[in-house]
């Protein structure tokens, strides 16, 4: 056997042996695993690997033990649920389900609430980093305080069930339901019987209508937990919501913490994050709550870490119980509701504490369609706001009075106790608060606002109608109406004055008395509606440009005069309508080119015909432009068509948008034909000197055309006047 054959045989045997006996790869290992090794006993299905492990302890560099507080068994059960409304999906609604009776008692669709599970699952929309965070093992327990007044049955029970199912039992000291003098039967004995199943739930009732602020104070005064956690009665807490809040308080007891408040839709109960999600709480100088972006200076390397916020949204927060009472709790002089979120926010910052929003804690909240119950007479949100301003805002209160002069004459009641508390706690002044805490608020809501760019009516020149918001609220679609200046009846129903402000949004009203609604459009083809102003531009960002549209009628002068001028977006009875000159030119450029080619070929043909008629005598030859006066019927026909199309365009402008657009296109094409035939530049605004590049070279025997104009003489008859330097031809 040759040497090469021996080596080939050796290599083949070695490869075969490796294929059979190499561990974990060879055929022998597969046979052994299948037949000789006993399989393990069937085990329970493994939970999803969502975090570091249920209950594992970790020791940090600061020596404090930390723990993964996720309840993976509960997370697994929620993931397996199915049904209408599960995982926070919108409940499918029919037209009948939108009946007003479903909203009348609660301000949200109680029909949907009654038809989705009390323990429904929610989507985990936290930042991914939250799933791997660990918190202190030794967290303080909390009393969860939930005030309610005539709350819906299922919305209240769903709040309780979500807390029980998604909160570690060891962290709940108690759940206190504070009934603010409800008169609905299901909130009396029936509620008592239902809550017996929950050992840590107790119900406290007021003897008269106290309002939200004093009801919270009553619950806080009865609480035994180390931390007070305030929630509303129509909430759903999300995965692992409580440990991130308590952890921040455990690290600094002079801290107020707020969860991210997600939106539960009042129609279909779909669950989603607020627009912009993590943003700082702020206010304008009429004391409306606002949200502003987190400035780069405060952005963390980990977006899921807590961040400072100047003011809270309102009813959802946690605070150390002892620290809350050191601050004096809520001002007991505040009536029913309103202003309390500013009072507690200013107080905690100015008196040595801090406030943070915690992205890893998420709580869904139903924002009502409207307030379904009556507020007792004699109460006033304005009075509450003035009381807060006079106690805490020092000289900055003047900016509020400038915008709300009616506040100056309101009585705040006795605020001497609040002034004394501020002095006792050695609180800083409001100027410090604006400089150190809310330093970015004036960027969006300056105390002294720059003057508006413009204000007045918005008139559509073509239809000679004005935009009218009719004093509408959120969702109102803008319409055109007869302008008040033109003699329309001056009634309260008309609202035709608008302000284009420094934020580049448009608001109803004069500059000093604008309303809190802005022109809003979700796309270039959608209707323009009123929506709550947010100051973040986006759908409410408008720009002003003078646009002269290339559609006109031919007047007595030698140039086209514009018949209408539109802003970037105009409100029509049914649709937005906007013409842009560059859009028309781009779309019909090929038509103009075709006309140019046609006229060039026609000119050659006419020139050849003239050449044949006059022979070789140069003196008898004329240019193409000299021949056109003899064929004035051609120009007359084109200009006549221009006039007819212009009149048709004006007639259909407000009723048929598509037809108007096509008419405008045709008119522009005819305009360019006239421009080419006349051999000179036609101005849209005023006559200009002849463009020498487009003017034929002068010839001693050739008259120079000076102007072309058409004017109506009688019905169906037009006079065409073509003037040259030495003669005038009238057809």
Image: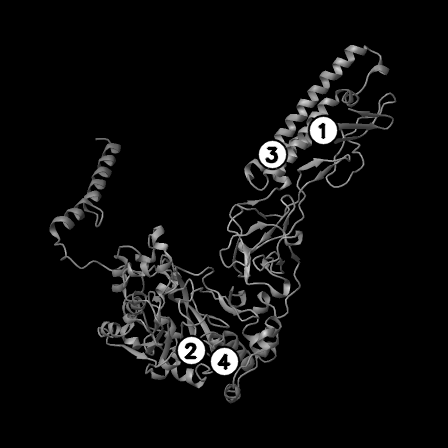
Q: Are marks 3 and 2 in contact (CB under 8 Å)?
A: no
From the image, state whether disc 4 or disc 3 is nearer to you: 3
Identify the image quadrant of residue 702.
Answer: top right
Q: Earlier in the sequence, mark 1 or mark 3?
A: 3
In the image, 419 versus 317, the foreground residue is 419
Q: Earlier in the sequence, mark 4 or mark 3?
A: 4
From the image, state whether disc 2 or disc 4 is nearer to you: 2
Q: Are marks 4 and 3 in contact (CB under 8 Å)?
A: no
Q: Earlier in the sequence, mark 2 or mark 4?
A: 2
> Label 1 to label 3, Cα distance in Å?
20 Å
Residue 694 lies, with reference to residue 257, above or below; the image says above
> Label 4 to label 3, Cα distance in Å?
65 Å
Residue matched to label 3: 663
Q: Position of residue 621 (x, y in %)?
A: 82, 16
> Label 2 to label 4, Cα distance in Å?
16 Å
Residue matched to label 4: 347
Q: Earlier in the sequence, mark 3 or mark 2?
A: 2
From the image, state whether disc 4 or disc 1 is nearer to you: 1
Residue matched to label 2: 213
From the image, state whether disc 2 or disc 1 is nearer to you: 2
Q: What secondary structure is found at the residue carrying circle 3? A: helix
Q: Are marks 2 and 1 in contact (CB under 8 Å)?
A: no
Q: How many marks?
A: 4
Residue at horizontal 52%, vertical 77%? Answer: 383
């Amino acid at each position: 056997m040759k040497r090469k054959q021996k080596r080939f045989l050796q290599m083949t045997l070695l490869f075969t042996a490796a294929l059979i006996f190499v561990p974990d790869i060879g055929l022998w290992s597969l046979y052994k695993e299948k037949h000789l090794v006993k399989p393990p006993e069937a085990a329970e299905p493994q939970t999803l690997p969502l975090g570091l492990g249920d209950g594992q302890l970790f020791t940090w560099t600061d020596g404090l033990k930390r723990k993964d507080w996720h309840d993976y068994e509960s997370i697994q059960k929620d993931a397996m649920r199915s049904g209408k409304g599960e995982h926070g999906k919108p409940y499918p609604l029919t037209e009948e389900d939108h009946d007003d009776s479903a909203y009348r008692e609660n301000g949200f669709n109680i029909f949907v609430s009654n038809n989705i599970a009390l323990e429904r699952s929610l989507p985990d929309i936290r930042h991914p980093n939250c799933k791997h965070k660990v918190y202190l093992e030794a967290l303080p327990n909390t009393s969860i305080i939930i005030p309610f007044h005539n709350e819906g049955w299922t919305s209240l029970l769903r709040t309780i069930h979500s807390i029980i199912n998604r909160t570690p039992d060891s962290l709940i000291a108690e759940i206190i339901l504070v009934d603010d003098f409800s008169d609905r039967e299901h909130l009396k004995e029936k509620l008592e019987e239902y809550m017996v199943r929950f050992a840590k739930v107790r119900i406290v009732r007021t003897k008269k209508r106290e309002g939200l602020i004093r009801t919270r104070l009553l619950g806080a005064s009865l609480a035994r937990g180390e931390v007070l956690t305030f929630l509303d009665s129509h909430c759903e807490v999300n995965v692992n919501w409580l440990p991130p809040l308590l952890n921040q308080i455990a690290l600094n007891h002079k801290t107020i913490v707020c969860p991210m408040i997600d939106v539960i839709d009042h129609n279909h109960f779909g669950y989603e994050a607020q627009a912009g999600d993590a943003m700082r709480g702020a206010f304008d100088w009429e004391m409306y709550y606002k949200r502003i972006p987190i400035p780069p200076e405060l952005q963390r390397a980990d977006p899921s870490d807590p961040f400072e916020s100047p003011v809270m949204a309102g009813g959802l927060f946690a605070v150390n119980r002892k620290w809350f009472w050191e601050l004096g709790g809520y001002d007991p002089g505040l009536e029913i509701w309103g202003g309390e979120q500013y009072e507690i926010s200013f107080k905690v910052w100015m008196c040595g504490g801090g406030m943070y929003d915690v992205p890893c804690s998420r709580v869904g909240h139903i924002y009502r369609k409207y307030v379904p119950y009556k507020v007792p007479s004699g109460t006033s949100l304005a009075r509450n706001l003035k009381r807060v301003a006079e106690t805490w805002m020092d000289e900055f209160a003047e900016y509020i009075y400038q915008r709300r002069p009616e506040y100056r004459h309101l009585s705040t009641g006795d605020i001497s106790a609040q002034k004394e508390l501020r002095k006792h706690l050695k609180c800083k002044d409001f100027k410090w608060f604006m400089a150190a805490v809310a330093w970015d608020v004036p960027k969006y809501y300056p105390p002294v606002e720059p003057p508006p760019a413009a204000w007045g009516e918005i008139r559509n020149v073509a239809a000679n109608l004005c935009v009218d918001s009719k004093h509408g609220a959120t969702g109102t679609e803008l319409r055109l109406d007869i302008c008040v200046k033109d003699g329309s009846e001056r009634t309260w129903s008309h609202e035709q004055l608008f302000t284009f402000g420094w934020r580049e949004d448009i608001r109803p009203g004069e500059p000093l008395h604008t309303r809190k609604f802005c022109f809003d459009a979700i796309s270039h083809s959608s209707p323009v509606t009123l929506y709550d102003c947010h100051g973040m531009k986006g759908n409410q960002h408008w720009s002003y440009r003078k646009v002269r549209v290339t559609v006109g009628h031919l007047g007595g002068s030698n140039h086209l005069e514009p018949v209408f001028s539109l802003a970037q977006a105009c409100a029509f009875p049914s649709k937005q309508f906007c013409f842009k000159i560059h859009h028309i030119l781009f779309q019909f450029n090929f038509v103009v080119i075709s006309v140019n080619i046609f006229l060039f070929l026609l000119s050659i043909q006419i020139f050849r015909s003239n050449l044949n008629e006059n022979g070789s005598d140069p003196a008898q030859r004329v240019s193409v432009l000299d021949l056109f006066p003899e064929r004035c019927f051609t120009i007359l026909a084109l200009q006549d068509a221009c006039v007819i199309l212009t009149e048709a365009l004006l007639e259909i402008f407000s009723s048929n948008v598509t037809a108007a657009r096509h008419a405008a296109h045709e008119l522009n094409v005819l305009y360019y034909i006239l421009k080419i035939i006349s051999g000179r530049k036609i101005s849209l605004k005023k006559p200009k000197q002849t463009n020498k590049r487009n003017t034929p070279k002068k010839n001693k025997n050739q008259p120079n055309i000076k102007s072309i104009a058409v004017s109506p003489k009688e019905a169906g008859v037009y006079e065409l006047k073509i003037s040259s330097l030495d003669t005038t031809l009238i057809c």
